[in-house]
Image (cartoon, grey):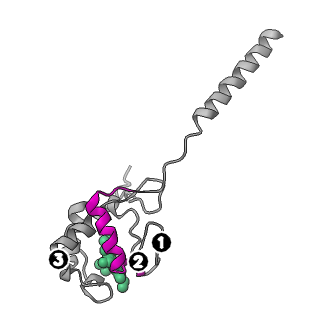
Amino acid sequence: MFIFAGIVVLAAIAKGYQQFTAEERPPPKHFYEWDETGLQGHLLYRKKGCNSCHRALGTGEVGVAPVLDGVGTRRTPEWLRQYLSDPGQLVEGTAHYGNLGPDFRLLNESEIIRLAAFLSGLQANPNSPNYPIRVILDDSD
Ligand code: HEC
């Protein structure tokens, strides 16, 4: 009887310990990594009013243009730099030829570097809706 009670108590302690260790916080959906250049890019992003169409850092418009939270996970730094120099090479009929969004071909080299560093720092974790989903096209097996 006592042995049984002892086992129950031990099990309860073990369970409590397990819950204690399992109480780690879930990873944040979005995280941000900037060096000095990235921080300057954030300033430029706000000055140029990018969030009148885009959403980043949890603020800005939704529905007009892609959400930029997680863009640094979805896109490589090279892609972002190329897009900021000539978006038409990557996206056909791009809004960033001045049709709707600002014409990126008018950005100078220093602005491109700063904005690309800012955008690369907008990272997403797998529990974010902005995390890139790998599409599996081959379902043959
Ligand atoms: C008037 C609306 C508007 C404004 C302002 C705007 N954008 Fe955009 N942006 C768009 C649209 C629409 C797209 C969709 C892709 C395209 O047309 O090339 C886009 C796409 C993008 C993308 C590509 C996202 C992806 O992963 O495909 C980036 C990066 C981007 N914009 C950055 C910026 C930055 C930086 C600024 C400020 C300098 C800015 N945008 C201002 C409308 C806008």
Q: In which quarter of the image is ligand 1?
A: bottom left
Question: Which numbered tag is attached to residue 59?
Answer: 1
Label 1: state its secondary structure. Answer: strand
What crowding class fits label 2: few (fewer than 14 Cα within 10 Å), some (14-19), or many (20 or more)? some
SS for callout 2:
helix
Task: Report crowding for label 1: few under 14, some 14 to 19, many 20 or more residues within 10 A (C-alpha).
Answer: few
Sequence-earlier tag: 3 or 2: 2
Name the spot of residue 64 as percent of width and height, x first.
Answer: 42, 81
Mark number, residue 108: 3
| Residue bearing the label numbered 2 | 51
Residue found at the very far left of the displayed protein: 109
- On the image, which quarter does residue 79 sit in? bottom left
Magenta span includes 50: yes
Please give left or right for residue 55 compared with residue 3 in the image. Answer: left
Q: Give the range drawn in magenta.
A: 32-52
Q: Residue at x 21, y 67 (%)?
A: 113
Q: Does the magenta stretch include residue 75?
A: no
Q: Please say whether residue 37 is visible from this viewpoint.
A: yes
Q: Do the residues labelled 2 and 1 touch (CB within 8 Å)?
A: yes
Give the residue drawn at x 80%, y 15%: 5
Report crowding for label 3: few under 14, some 14 to 19, many 20 or more residues within 10 A (C-alpha).
Answer: few
Residue 117 in percent (x, y) is at: 27, 63
Query: Which residue is rendered at x = 38% and y = 69% of the image?
Result: 68
